Amino acid sequence: MTRAAMPDIDERLDEDVGEDVDTERPWIVLVWNDPINLMSYVAFVFRKLFGYSRQKADKLMLDVHHKGRAVVSSGTREKAEMDVFRLHEHGLWATMQQDD
């Protein structure tokens, strides 16, 4: 039995891999409309995760419902990643991107 040759491994980890990330611009978290979750549940999640008032949570929920999405938080990349993770844990469709 012959052993397959190992491919050369490129260990240049510090090189740019094509992502243009500006560390100065904040990241935003978007929640997208979906056909599954009730509007009352979406508002409840916003209050629970972000501590928003009922009025603010309802406004964001209505933006999601009528506009298809809403920005629910912003901050560092790490904070945005955590917020997206927590929203996913609650069954909401969420993404993050750098603010324009």
Image: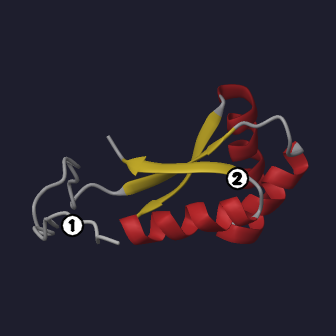
> Local crowd at mark 1 within 10 Å, few (<14), some, or many (≥20)?
few
- Residue 46 in the image, given as x and y percentages of width and height: 72, 59
Q: Is residue 33 visible?
A: yes
Q: Is 11 left or right of 78, judged from the image as shown?
A: left
- Mark 2 or mark 1, whichever is nearer to me: 1
Element on which disc 1 rests: loop
Residue at image point 87% right, 54% down? 41
Q: Amino acid at mark 1?
A: Ala
Answer with mark 2 or mark 1, whichever residue precedes in sequence: 1
**Which numbered disc covers residue 20?**
none
The residue beneath circle 1 is 5
Q: Residue furthest front?
A: 1
Q: Is residue 53 visible?
A: no
The quadrant where residue 69 appears: top right
Element on which disc 2 rests: helix
Above or below, comparing residue 19 to residue 1 in the picture: above
Residue at image point 77% right, 56% down? 91
Q: Amino acid at mark 2?
A: Lys
- Residue 1 in the image, given as x and y percentages of width and height: 35, 72
Disc 2 versus disc 1: distance between alpha carbons? 60 Å
Q: Is 73 left or right of 50, judged from the image as shown?
A: left
The residue beneath circle 2 is 56
Residue at image point 10% right, 67% down? 12
The quadrant where residue 9 appears: bottom left
- Residue 87 in the image, given as x and y percentages of width and height: 67, 61
Q: Residue furthest top?
A: 66
Residue at image point 46% right, 70% down? 79
- Residue 35 in the image, given as x and y percentages of width and height: 83, 34
